[in-house]
Image (cartoon, grey):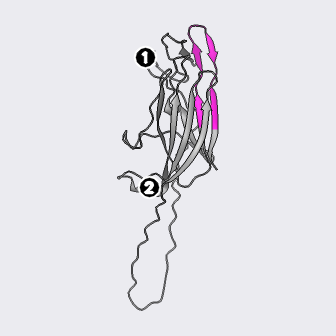
Amino acid sequence: MARKNRLRRLGATVAVAPILVLGACSSEAPVTADPTRTQTPASTGTTPPATTGSATSDPIETTTTPAVAEPTKIPVKVTLKDPVLGHTITATEVMRNMRWPKGHPVAAEAFEIVGVNVKFAAGDRYTAELTPQYVTLKYGNAYARPTTEFGPDFAKPIKAAKRGETRSGWLIYKIDKGASPLGLMFHRPAYQVSTTDKAIKALVLQAALTK
């Protein structure tokens, strides 16, 4: 039977036993199954039809460079608040079509990098951290988890906030190019409070970012 994450109230330590995890120990960070299934974006490129002609001169070969969309800043004001743990996630800006780092030419043709500028404020009542991996981006009918594949220097990615801590930074996602609308979702796992045996149910919060 799956065990629940265990928390203690302020001033006590926490023994975390994640849901749906094998071989976890009390010193490991929470590792939970994402309530949503992240769908890997599929390539949607098309091949232009071949052309024929009757010109007597030798054909002139031409090449077309795909247009590159310019980065777009979208101011937003979205807040997700966990009423039990006290965690607060505030999004202030969405950046669409972020510049691709060098070394990703193929991915740049099929996918889009989207950044969400956020502030994490972790609640101070329990020991549960506010973790970036719990915050997914909904695009159309698909979902994406934050990616760190572009390295720690790309757009200042946000880090987990511990109890009572506040952090700011970017959540970076890789999605199908041009997908809309965008929404922010917080998937908080269930916990068990070790000092009182109180059960805290899992929670899903969401809000629209763009139309």
For residue 60, above or below residue 163: below
Q: Residue at x 37, y 41 (%)?
A: 151
Which disc, if any, is residue 108?
2
Image x and y of residue 42, in percent:
52, 52
Q: Give the position of the N terminus as an image quadrant.
A: top right
Left or right: 114, with 106 as reference point: right
Viewer-side residue, 103 vs 168: 168
Residue 116 painted magenta: no
Per the image, label 2 sits on a secondary structure element best described as: helix
The magenta stretch is: 185-206
Image x and y of residue 12, in percent:
49, 10
For residue 62, above or below residue 58: above
Q: CA distance from mark 1 to mark 2?
A: 39 Å
Residue farthest along the bottom direction in this orientation: 56
- The residue identified by callout 1 is 27
Viewer-side residue, 123 vs 146: 123
Displayed quadrant of residue 200: top right
Q: Amino acid at mark 1?
A: Ser
Q: Amino acid at mark 2?
A: Ala
Viewer-side residue, 153 vs 6: 153
Left or right: 17, with 62 as reference point: right
